[in-house]
Amino acid sequence: MARAGIITRVTATFPLHAILWDLDGVVVDSFNGHFHAWQRIFAELGEPFSLEDFTRTFGMNNRGILHTLLAREMEEQEFWALSERKERYFRDAIRGNCRLLPGVADWLRRFDRLGLKQAIASSAPQENIDALLDELGVRRWFAAVASGAKLRGKPDPAVFLLAASLLRVEPGACLVIEDAVAGVEAAKRAGMRCLAVLTTNPPQKLARADGIVQDLAHFSEEALLALSASGG
């Protein structure tokens, strides 16, 4: 018999049916790869780029990052050329240099055993998502992959709503796992519950989340039950 408070398997009456994983900073530690890629881009532009700039825009798509940090409008051709170059720099940087964050491997298996559908919902371009999933060997756990690179960027909920649609799950039955301020806000705008991990930001900046943990190694099935009861 299962211990009290421990889920043995999700049933039709359990309010959560899907887990939507952000990728960078949630599944994988790719902070340095992105930071150094953006450093190269801004150096080529002759513009300043600090660790503070990077941290406050982490979780946005490339359009959102460039719009936030550049004090000028950018033609579409220039934007796509910069964006594609930045992502090439990133993919070069992560080869052989990325790892799963604490607790991720365990929870991918546990969510699967519980019968919850799982999807990636990331602001990253599809090529980056594919490179990371293949590098880490975790693609098999995800029934769907949603890229927000060509959608309205977080904090707009577009990528989370797309992921829910691909899984054929109502937004209110989804739990988002996020590390970025913009990502937490996007999850809440989508009407989803949100668990925040402290990979990138301090807890006070993630206060909109329904739950906050240091990392997924500190998450429990009791906490999952509490989140499922918290409402979107």
Image (spheres, grey):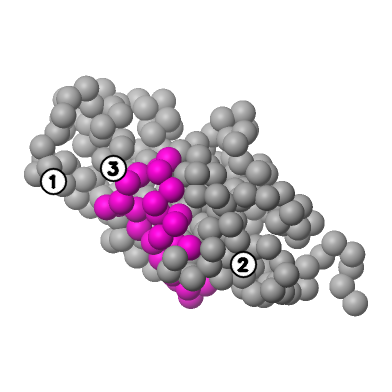
Residue type highlighted by circle 2: His
Q: Is residue 37 above or below residue 93?
A: above
Q: Is residue 156 above or below residue 168?
A: above
Between marks 3 and 2, how big is the CA–CA gap? 30 Å
Asked whether 155 falls inside the magenta stretch, the response is: yes
Q: Earlier in the sequence, mark 1 or mark 2?
A: 2
Q: Secondary structure at mark 1?
A: helix
Residue type highlighted by circle 3: Asn
Please identify, in this view, whether the residue under mark 3 or under mark 2 is nearer the observer: 2
Q: Is residue 36 above or below residue 111?
A: above
Q: Secondary structure at mark 2?
A: loop
Find residue 59 and report its image quarter.
top left
The residue wearing badge 1 is 81
Q: Is residue 4 above or below residue 156?
A: below
Using the rendered image of the protein, determine whether residue 68 is visible from the camera's viewpoint: yes
Residue 10, position as x, y percentages in the image:
71, 72
Residue positioned 57% across, 52% down in the render: 192
Between marks 1 and 3, how big is the CA–CA gap? 11 Å
Find residue 121 and report its image quarter.
bottom left
Q: Which residues are magenta?
A: 136-164
Residue 168, position as x, y percentages in the image:
49, 71
Residue type highlighted by circle 1: Ala
The residue wearing badge 2 is 17
Please identify, in this view, whether the residue under mark 1 or under mark 2 is nearer the observer: 2
Q: Which quadrant is home to the N terminus? A: bottom right
Residue positioned 31% across, 51% down in the render: 151
The residue wearing badge 3 is 62
